[in-house]
Each structure stands twice: as structure tokens, then as C-alpha cells.
Amino acid sequence: YHICTRGVEQRNIFHHNADKRRFTDLLIHYLPRGEIRSYSIAKKFGHDIKRTQSGAGLIDLLAYCLMDNHIHLLVRENVEGGTSKYMHRILTSYARFFNMESVISFV
């Protein structure tokens, strides 16, 4: 599948290189099947991000491109519904991070 998603009103979703690094970490962190510890908690307790072997995760991430206001992913689904579950995980996690960063930067 080719997946493309963008920010509301075509606004930037990545403001700094650190934002792109965070999203890249999320792409890897949420690949495994089963219950996954939240990225923030895993990071807080020093857990390494584990890569999965091809075919072992919800999806295989074949390629990705992060632009300032949108992303492109090329994925192969390994589990029925895996693409939807994977996208929900990474986008929810990044939205929480993005919204917290926005609140902090305006206070």
C-alpha cells in the first residue's frame, strides 16, 4: 500500500529535525504485533527500539518519505487489519507529542 497523510489545512507537521527523528522512531517502535508499550514510557525507562524481521510485524515498512507537511509510506500488510492498527498507533502517538509540543511552546 502507498499511504499518504498530511496535517490539517496543509500545515506543517514537522517543525524541526527532532520532530522527524521522533516520527522515524515511532515508525520502528510500533511495528511489532501484540501489545506495545507506549513510546514515551519505553523511552523514559531506557528501553531500546527493537526492529522486527520482515514478515514478523503488523506490516513491513518498505519505504517512507517525511516532508514538512505530509508523509508517504510504502507498506506491505502481514496481518489482516495490520495497516490500520499500525497507522492508528503511530499517528495517535505523534499527535499527542505534537500537541504537547505546541502547548509548551506557546506558554
Image (cartoon, rainbow, N blue to C red):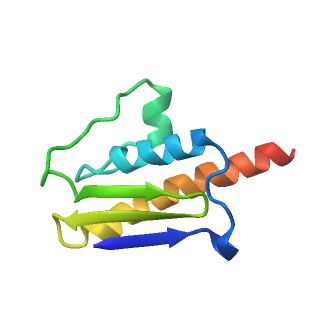
Residue 39 in picture, x, y percent from top left? 45, 41
Please state the total of marks drawn on the protein image: 0
Residue 13 in picture, x, y percent from top left? 62, 58
Q: What residue is rendered at 60% in x and 57% in y?
A: 68
In the rendered image, which quarter is residue 65 located in?
Answer: bottom left
- In the picture shown, does residue 67 fall above or below 18? below
Q: Nearer the viewer, residue 42 or 87?
A: 87
Q: Nearer the viewer, residue 90 or 19?
A: 19
Q: What residue is rendered at 21% in x and 65% in y?
A: 76
Q: Residue furthest right?
A: 107
In the rendered image, which quarter is residue 9 located in?
Answer: bottom right
Q: What residue is rendered at 56% in x and 69% in y?
A: 6
100 on left or right of 95: right
Q: Is residue 4 visible?
A: yes
Q: Is residue 38 visible?
A: no
- In the picture shown, does residue 31 fall above or below 88? above
82 on left or right of 23: left
Q: Nearer the viewer, residue 14 or 30?
A: 14
- In the picture shown, does residue 71 fall above or below 44? below
Instruction: Tell me the quadrant of the picture where the C terminus can be found.
Output: top right
Q: Residue furthest top?
A: 46
Residue 94 in picture, x, y percent from top left? 54, 53
- In the picture shown, does residue 79 fall above or below 47? below
Q: Residue furthest bottom?
A: 9
53 on left or right of 101: left
Q: What residue is rendered at 70% in x and 46% in y?
A: 101
Instruction: Tell me the quadrant of the picture where the N terminus can be found.
Output: bottom left
